[in-house]
Amino acid sequence: MIEVRNVTKRFDGFTALDDLSITVPTGAVYGLVGPNGAGKSTLIRHLAGIYRQDRGEVRIDGEAVFDNPAVKQKIAYIPDEIFYYTQATIRDMMRFYRDVYPSFDTACFDKLGEAFDLDQKRAMRKLSKGQQKQAAFWLALAQRPEIVILDEPVDGLDPVMRRQVWSLLLADVAERGTTVLVSSHNLRELEDVCDHVGIMNRGKMLIERSLSELQDNIVKIQLAFAEDTELPNELTILHQSRTGRLQQLILRGKADEISARLALLNPLFLDVLPLSLEEIFIYELGGAEHEVKDIVL
């Protein structure tokens, strides 16, 4: 289990993490989302043991992460920007990983070569960005980690390889109970793979729930009335738009309870629509403030 408790981190007077707490259950696929500058990468670097918090605790399985090699050996970390030794080949990096991580599985590495069609003797610096990401996943999965931490992991990969990588990761979760924490702006993709979601903004955790609970607590409804009708004050409306008589509402609450309440107003039309993680993200952050703005140039 990953536990972050009341962590604060400042850089030159700027507060990157502000009394932040998160919990990632063992075996979960946890999606970390938030706008640019929310503090996601800073949090991830604490979890990987790169940064030391100014205040609070960062623990994995009850042990502090920073300056703890035994804990770090359990972690595979793939950052947004990949770094390898300049002249190293994939085979060279395999030997390096094998020496650093006791759990590294050479047989697994050789087997994964079937999925990642890369020349092991080619220098890493001569690979494209997408190929370097493939090499990073190849090495990380062969490490047989207990925890995988990913920062914009599939950026640069083509659609087929994205699917291949997620298939391998999720198979590891199912077979070995691997815990995965992934930060990404591709919310559609996270929606397909994550079972827990944390939404960050300005160094704070706004909301942290299982994806099913998150989707159950915000509702999108379309409805129309024969004449202007005032909506009940007890409804928590996050967003409201209108096209002619047709209204679209984003509301906080349970779909069955809200639709039953609105049905009492005898609308001409009422429909409950599925809400995407991207829409949940926008309205949990504050609705219109984070919507795309129409600007005439």
Image (cartoon, rainbow, N blue to C red):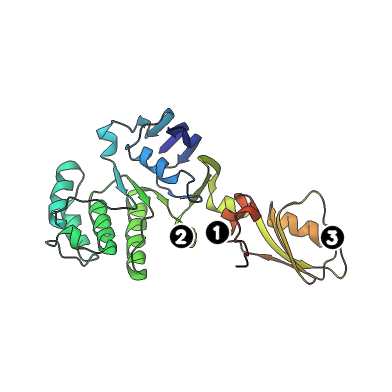
Where residue 149 sits: x, y (%)? 35, 47
Q: Residue at x 33, y 50 (%)?
A: 79
Q: Secondary structure at mark 3?
A: loop
Mark positioned earlier in the residue sequence (3 or 1): 3
Residue at x-position 38% and y-position 33%: 59
**Which is nearer the eye, 142 or 177?**
142
**Pointer 2 or 3: first along the chain:** 2
* Along the line of sight, the residue nearer the viewer: 167 or 280: 280
**Label number found at residue 186:** 2
Marks 1 and 2: in contact by CB < 8 Å? no
- From the image, tell me which residue sits under label 1: 278
Q: Can residue 178 be seen at all in this image of the molecule?
A: no
**Residue 162 image offset from top left, x and y in percent:** 35, 64
The answer to whether residue 292 is above or below residue 19 is below
Marks 2 and 3 sit apart, C-alpha to C-alpha, by 39 Å
- Give the residue type at disc 1: Glu
Residue labelled with disc 3: 264
Q: Quadrant of the C terminus?
A: bottom right
Q: Position of residue 234 (x, y in %)?
A: 79, 48
* Side of 251 relative to 70 (left or right): right
Question: How many other residues sit within 10 Å of disc 3, few (<14), some (14-19) or many (≥20)?
Answer: few
Q: Is residue 200 left or right of residue 137?
A: right
Q: Earlier in the sequence, mark 2 or mark 1?
A: 2
